[in-house]
Image (spheres, rainbow, N blue to C red):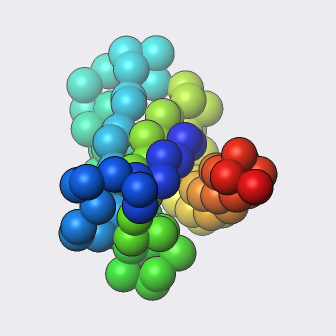
Amino acid sequence: MHAYDRSTDIAREGGPRTGLVVSKAVGNAVVRHRTSRRLRHLAYTAMQGGTMRRTCDYVIRALPAIATAEPKEVAREFDRALAKAHKRLDEHQA
């Protein structure tokens, strides 16, 4: 996951924005679609819970292992990746 803080940009209104990258390496169309739905749900939950920063854009890239991972494991990894992206962003801004 990557994060970009757009708080200094002109277009900073609105909440966090997300983009998904789910390549064919993840699986066939059904698996990719299921993966996209899971990731969108996790992103929506993070937005509503305030975990995602309102002034950030996020790119979420699904790795092939997500196709066989349990939903709880995917949620844990999502939270870990989000925290890591925020940490990198904070280090870059300091």
Q: Residue at x 32, y 21 (%)?
A: 28
The residue lying furthest to the bottom in this view is 49
Q: Position of residue 13 (x, y in %)?
A: 23, 67
- Examine the image and state in which quarter residue 40 appears: bottom left
Q: Is residue 84 visible?
A: no
Q: Position of residue 9 (x, y in %)?
A: 34, 51
Question: Closest to the observer: 91 or 71?
Answer: 91
Question: Closest to the observer: 39 or 1?
Answer: 1
Question: Closest to the observer: 47 or 91?
Answer: 91
Report the number of discs: 0
Q: Residue at x 71, y 46 (%)?
A: 92
Question: Closest to the observer: 76 or 88?
Answer: 88
From the viewer's perspective, tell me whether residue 69 is left or right of residue 12: right
Give the quadrant of the N terminus: top right
Q: Position of residue 94 (x, y in %)?
A: 75, 55
Q: Residue at x 46, y 81 (%)?
A: 50
- Examine the image and state in which quarter residue 55 appears: bottom left
From the viewer's perspective, tell me whether residue 30 is left or right of residue 2: left
